[in-house]
Image (cartoon, grey):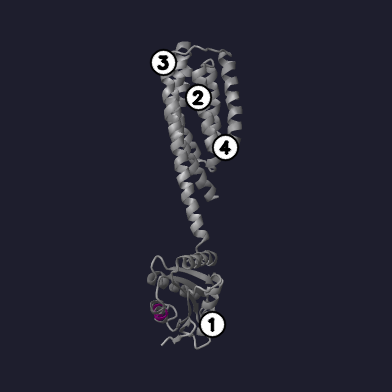
Amino acid sequence: MENQRGKGLSFARRIYLPRAIGLGVGFFSVGAALYPLNMPTWLWLLLVFNGFIWPHLAFQVSTRSAFPYQAERRNLLYDSLCGGFWAACCQFNPLTAVTILSMMTMNNVAAGGRRLFVLGAITQVAGMLLGGLIFGFKFNPMMTQTQVWACLPMLTLYPLAVGMVCYQLAIKLAQHKRTLSALSRTDSLTGLLNHGAWKDLLHLKFQQCRQHNTQAILALIDIDHFKLINDSYGHIVGDAVLQQLSRELKRLLDSGELAGRYGGDEFCVILPDLPLNKAESLMEQLRQALDQYRHPDVPEMRVSLSIGLARFQPNYSDAIAWLDDADKALYTAKHTGRNTISVALSHSATRAGL
């Protein structure tokens, strides 16, 4: 309910400026056409109200409504009704009538697409019938120089206002699209890349290493006995451990080094253009940082990591082979005492975590 109201308020705010500009300059277009026709005073007062008071009143009506979107759509239809009415009052003067009706039609299409275009057109016809019933159905093809000049602001300022609103809306939509794209690639708990996004980057990095003959290190990181942590201290404490690991990864890694949550308590990192010894040193810093971590509510809890490293090899058939080597190294680390960094090399170097 609150979300719908928020969208309705945003819609009303987008319409407010084009309506205020359009009806304000429209006053002069209609006034120039009405002046030679000796219309009654009440009609001029209605024109003043429609041109300078109604835009602000309509905004208050829609923003104070429980359903702002529906209220604003009704306001747009009222605008169309008035447009048809003024076209008839001006005796369907070609320049004034076409200017008013086309600008309002453009606004309806921009605000509500085909449906509002159709409803607006029907309402415009209703307004013409109302004006014709009051003042008669007359056609006045004569156009004065004053009427031409009076219509120019409507033909320039109003499309500019509508265009600016559409541009701002397009910018917001692009921002929302980027935000949604980032959310779809991000693990909500840790803020790191999720499984799918990281796998995509792994394949990309594999191709870059193969094509440009560059090096990279792949690291798989597993929290030792994480299920025991959840069972003993609860999932809230377990989530805190996962978040702490993600914070340490973000602190230690450069922007070009890509970390992700592979699943559950398993994390993954791609370290491009980094020698193996430096990669081991970096992962050792990570292992020590988690070893020193103390949760404020359960200071007795200890956290350790098992880490498997695999250097890119030109003879890998695909990225999965590279990942499989890192996974084998992780398996070795987990089955040789844990709290360990294991390296998948031809000479199978394995290092204990001190």
In the rendered image, residue 261 lying in the magenta stretch gets the answer no
* Quarter of the view holding residue 328: bottom right
Q: Which residue is mark 1?
A: 331
Rendering coords of residue 62 (x, y %): 50, 38
Quadrant the C terminus occupies: bottom left
Rendering coords of residue 126 (x, y %): 60, 24
Rendering coords of residue 152 (x, y %): 42, 23
Sequence-wise first label, 1 or 4: 4
Tell me: residue 353, above or below residue 326. Answer: below
Task: Kindly check if marks 3 and 2 are in contact, taking CB atoms under 8 A apart as contact.
Answer: no
Task: Kindly check if marks 4 and 2 are in contact, taking CB atoms under 8 A apart as contact.
Answer: no
Q: CA distance from mark 1 to mark 2?
A: 75 Å
Magenta part, dominant SS: helix
* Residue at (46% x, 73% y) in the render: 240
Per the rendered image, the range of residues in magenta is 284-288
* Residue at (51% x, 56% y) in the render: 181
Q: Which residue is mark 4?
A: 113
Q: Which residue is mark 2?
A: 100
Q: Nearer the viewer, residue 174 or 276?
A: 276
Lateral position of residue 254 relative to residue 228, left or right = left
